[in-house]
Amino acid sequence: MQITIRHAEPADAPALRDLYALPNAQAGTLQLPYPTLSVWQKRLESGDVVALVAEADGLLVGQISLHVEPNPRRKHVAGIGMGVRDDWAGKGVGSALMAAALELADNWLNLHRIELTVFVDNEAAQALYRKFGFVEEGRACDYAFRQGRYVDVFYMARVAGGASR
């Protein structure tokens, strides 16, 4: 099985809507149930983010985006959002996406700091991020409302050339 990484295109909107409608992908992100096609079409057409997708056997199996900070004093920073199809979790999709996104960040986009939040109960995602040099910088209590209750997240970041302080 070969995983191919490429830039997301507007034609990927239906597959991305379907990916983020899956229970585990949805629970691990800030996506709401019943995502609409128009939301994903607008996101892909806006050009505000660098979005990559992973494909295997012609199926879109994951997505990652880099959200570059618009403030001139934080143009060296981007946030990451990502999701993997539930049935493809643990098969290397997240690692392939993260490697491609960080290669872009480090060698093409001149990004120095990559930030993210991850739910404290998402141990698989935390392990992936640590594998790529992200470190925990703090915890936000009751950060998001998910499945009828408030849940905490860890703030994690990766600083190019070394670990966060």
Image: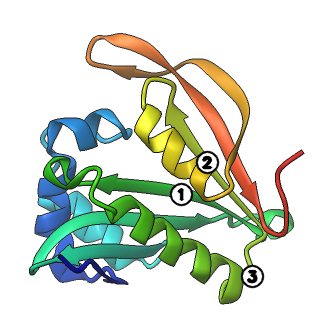
Q: Quick check: can you spot residue 140?
A: yes
At numbered mark 2, what does the secondary structure look like: helix, strand or loop? Answer: helix
The amino acid type of the residue labelled 1 equals Ile
Q: Residue furthest bottom?
A: 108
Alpha carbon distance from label 2 to label 1? 14 Å
The disc placed on residue 16 is none
Q: Earlier in the sequence, mark 3 or mark 1?
A: 1
At numbered mark 3, what does the secondary structure look like: helix, strand or loop? Answer: loop
> Which residue bears the numbered disc 1?
80
Picture quarter containing residue 18?
bottom left
Q: Which of the two discs, 2 and 3, sits closer to the camera?
A: 2
Taking the image as shown, residue 65 lies to the left or right of residue 160, namely left
Which residue corresponds to the image point at 27% horizontal and 83% vertical from the top-left?
9
Q: Within 10 Å of the Cα at label 1, are there few (<14), some (14-19), or many (20+) other Cα atoms?
A: many
Taking the image as shown, residue 112 lies to the left or right of residue 102, namely right
Q: Nearer the viewer, residue 83 or 143?
A: 83
Q: Earlier in the sequence, mark 2 or mark 3?
A: 3
Q: Residue furthest right?
A: 165
Q: Is residue 37 above or below residue 23?
A: below
Q: Nearer the viewer, residue 18 or 163?
A: 163
Q: Position of residue 77 (x, y in %)?
A: 73, 64
Colouring: rainbow
The amino acid type of the residue labelled 2 equals Arg
> Which residue bears the numbered disc 2?
130
Q: Within 10 Å of the Cα at label 3, are there few (<14), some (14-19), or many (20+) other Cα atoms?
A: few
The disc placed on residue 110 is 3
Which part of the image, by quadrant, shows the C terminus?
top right
Taking the image as shown, residue 53 lies to the left or right of residue 75, namely left
Q: Is residue 17 above or below residue 99?
A: above
Q: Is residue 164 above or below residue 75?
A: above
Which residue corresponds to the image point at 29% horizontal and 33% vertical from the top-left?
27
At numbered mark 1, what does the secondary structure look like: helix, strand or loop? Answer: strand
